[in-house]
Amino acid sequence: MHSDGLDTQRALAARFIALSRVGTALMREVDENRLLQLIAETACELTGAQFAAFSIRPIDETGQPLVPSEGYLFHLAAVVGVTKEQKEFFQHVPLGGEGLLAPIFHHGVSVLVSDVLTHITHASNLSSTATRQSAREAAFAYVHGELPSEQLRSMGVPRGHPLVRSFLGAPLLDRDKQVRGGLLLGHGEPGQFTPEDEVLLTSLAAQAAVALENARLYRMTQLRAQELHAIFESITDGIVLVNQHGEIVRENEAARLLRTSLQQEPSLAALLHTPAQMALTTQSIQEQSVVVANETGDVKEYVVTASPLHLAEKASGPLQQEGIHQQPLLQLSAGAVVVWHDVTERRMRERERVAYAEAEARLVLLQKILDELPSSVYLVYGEDARLMLANRATQAVWGAVWQRDVPMQTFLQSQGIKIFGTDGRPLAPMHLATIRVLKQKTPVYQHEESIRQPNGTTLSVVVNAVPLDLPRPFPFAEMTKQVTSEPCAIVVHQNVTALKETEQLKDEFLALAAHELRTPLAILKGFAQTLLVQTARGKGPTLAEWQTESLQGIDQATTRMVELTEDLLDVTRLQAGRLELQKEPTDLIALVQRFVGKLQLTTQHHLLLHSELPHLVVAIDPRRIEQVLSNLLGNAIKYSLGDEPVEITLSQDDANEMAVVRIRDYGIGIPTPQHSRLFGRFARADNAQAHGIGGTGLGLYLCRELIERHGGRIWFQSVEGEGSTFFFTLPLLSPASSDAIL
Ligand code: ADP
């Protein structure tokens, strides 16, 4: 197309320059779209084409074509020198192995046509199938060098295609000589492209193919590098790469965070320097446990692994790419990789598991021991006494299974269990030992209760309930949370039904014996009295002195025996709940004065009565209160060895509206260890027996029962060898209530 030789040379030089420029650009460009555009533009520029279309076949990530080379839509990668409409047209036209494109897309051979018009078959008598067939055959012959390009058949230029007379097309072949795309050039004038253009285009296409492959590889490498980077950073273990000098070359986020949180150098040495050094010099370190403390003082445990790292001479690939590497890894010929795996949680869980297993084992042992105890033992918590733990005997006591965490009242009600006091009356919940210990937080000892089980069986039990300070954490792990702030108590029930039955038999026997003794004693006393009185009146013969004394002895002993049997009967009445009080408003001062006056006649001890009040009106059974006075004053006299006085003081406790009686003696006193049990039945102090002072140990028991049944209280203070003071109180009668009683 250039006639002038100089021009031709210049054009050739320009072409050469352009080609080498594009070659360099092609090698440098890694953006595929820009690359394709550059190729298309260069092709136009070098050949003087009016337009160029660059289409490529869609491929997958690995470079494999997604569609066959013929008859499918190729992806229009770049286009130069066309209108918008024409571009649109190119995007939708299939690039088949038809006509002039067949050698390019079907066989991978370039095509140069000086005038497309001369290739179009105008014979109207040929069917389109025949035309297509002959075009195919021509293409086949052409690619095999059996036909000049002038003999190729065109299937015509479709509507919308830019006007094309000169046509030059070259295939893009990949490494496997597969058609990867086509570079198609056109010109509106015929004869625009030369065979040199064809050679040029073919070589450009070859370069483009390599550049495209590079771009694809680069894209993939970059993707992979990003993937690896993302994985590396997201690993929760800390990973550190060090070079042969032990310097950190690369580390992930987890490692960075941990390293910067460490304050002390020794921690970093244990975690990193030492393992890295060992990996660099000798061998890899497997699973070494390291404990470190971070800046907030939290202790963490890591399993450290370190292994030598040998990189290939020419380190290549993803790690060096832009934005990914931190240090020039290329310089790393040897090094080590250290991995920190945080096992703090795991170790903690392991320790917890061991502790839990130990606690469980202790609990099982405790439960076994408890189950073997004959008495019922259970633990309760909360003011409503929810069950925490119970032994086997508990079930026998209640006659039902008390489930864990169920409040006592709910359990009793649901099972129809009733609890009674010693007087046979139902006990209100707040009086039950189990509830009381939790509410008052003080121990309840020897509380007698009787339990009526669901099947009607009644058990007599003695309950001891003691508040507990549970150790934290409490071995019953699952309950620890519930009980931390709530009161707890251990409750022991001792089944005393058999004992009670024996006692009842004894009481019945006593009652019977005392009752049976009454009549003969009355007769004995009657006859002794008759003899004494009648003799004194001069009836019958006069008795010798020794006879009178004997009769008096009989009389006194009988009186004593009557008193004793009365005491015994009272005890049995009290036990059976049959002792009735005949209460009436009484002036306690007058009653005590009368009683003391009578008693003074029978004793040498001075009975000193003192009261600043004229009256103290109480609602009492006078006979029973006299019985109390008789016991207490009798004791005061009996346990005074000489003729020490006995002081009786009457006063009023305004705060509690009580009359207070105080009886003080200077006798033998009571040893302190025995104070607590003297109000029990048949209880006597050691020193009384040691002094040979007779007694039954029933008096104080009766006194307490009688006083308490009057709504009063009785107690004493005593020092052995110095004497004793007994107190009792009785509720005062207000004028209003005294009217009510009268
Ligand atoms: P007893 O018939 O033995 O006197 P009590 O029930 O009246 O029975 O008294 C119980 C015990 O308390 C006595 O045996 C005695 O040891 C002691 N006791 C009671 N009162 C006194 C007192 N005033 N001084 C010393 N000991 C006393």
Image (cartoon, rainbow, N blue to C red):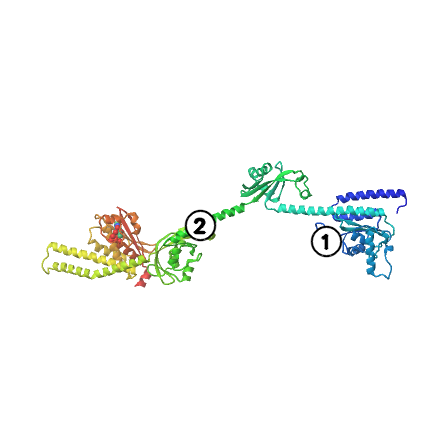
Q: Which residue is mark 2?
A: 361
Would you identify the image quadrant in which residue 543 lies? bottom left
* Disc 2 secondary structure class: helix
* Residue type pointed to by label 1: Leu
What mark, if any, has residue 394 been given in the picture?
none
* Residue type pointed to by label 2: Ala
588 vs 337, left or right, is left
Q: Decide: is 427 above or below 61.
A: below
Mark 1 or mark 2: whose residue is earlier in sequence: 1
The x, y position of residue 729, in whole percent, is: 30, 55
The x, y position of residue 321, in whole percent, is: 69, 43
The x, y position of residue 405, in whole percent, is: 44, 56
Would you identify the image quadrant in which residue 4 lies? top right
Q: Which residue is mark 1?
A: 66
Front residue of 677 and 82: 82
353 vs 596, left or right, is right
* Disc 1 secondary structure class: loop
